[in-house]
Amino acid sequence: MDDHGHVHDADEHDRGRAAQRAKPVVVDVEITDDSNPDDVQCNLSSKEITIKGGDTLIFSNDHHPGFVITFQLTNTDRYKDYVFPNHVHDDRWHDSIWAKPIDDVHDSCPHLERWTGFWQLGVSKDNKTVTVSNPNPRKQLFKFALRFAKNANEAAVAMCDPIGDNQNGPTS
């Protein structure tokens, strides 16, 4: 990790171990409008966490050292062909998640950023789910981009930009 909290590949092993003890969360992602590929509209829902205003995921640790979040595409309609792209080492255009800490919800969306506060662990074989780690170490607003492709081996062509709100609840 550099001074700005951006992830570098050398950190992957340590991040994976920490994620094993985290609270599991599933977030359903339903694409509802892709007319603007840079701002795809999505409905997000979860049984494990609160989603405020339809796009702000509230993370309170509830006695866990962070979260492991599985985002799963649920479309069965005309958007069913979207997938999360396969991760390609050092090619951020193939990342399924971009993320960055922010001070205000009106700050710009992430563009090519990787952040140790919210990073991609892997994509399922069918490319319909992406798993992300959020250690939630302190109170922090952040923006993240869920990135979609029409072919799993191609770079993402569309993205949805939710907000995360780390509440840093108790971890023991």
Image (tube, helix red, strand yellow):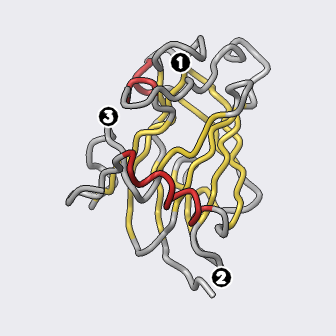
Residue 31 location in percent, x, y? 63, 27
Q: Secondary structure at mark 3?
A: loop
Residue 59 location in percent, x, y? 56, 66
Q: Nearer the viewer, mark 1 or mark 3?
A: 3
Q: What is the spatial separation of the Cα atoms under label 1 and label 2, in whole angstroms?
A: 38 Å
Q: Which residue is mark 2?
A: 63
Q: Earlier in the sequence, mark 1 or mark 2?
A: 1
Q: Nearer the viewer, residue 125 or 82?
A: 125
Marker disc for residue 34: 1
Q: Nearer the viewer, mark 1 or mark 2?
A: 2
Residue 84 location in percent, x, y? 59, 27
Name the amino acid, label 2: His
Marker disc for residue 168: none
Name the quadrant of the C terminus.
bottom right
Q: Nearer the viewer, residue 72 or 152?
A: 152
Q: Residue at x 47, y 51 (%)?
A: 12
Marker disc for residue 112: 3
Q: Residue at x 61, y 63 (%)?
A: 67
Badge 2: few (under 14), some or many (20 or more) residues near its Cα, within 10 Å?
few
Q: Nearer the viewer, residue 163 or 90?
A: 90
> In the drawing, does residue 111 fall left or right of residue 9?
left
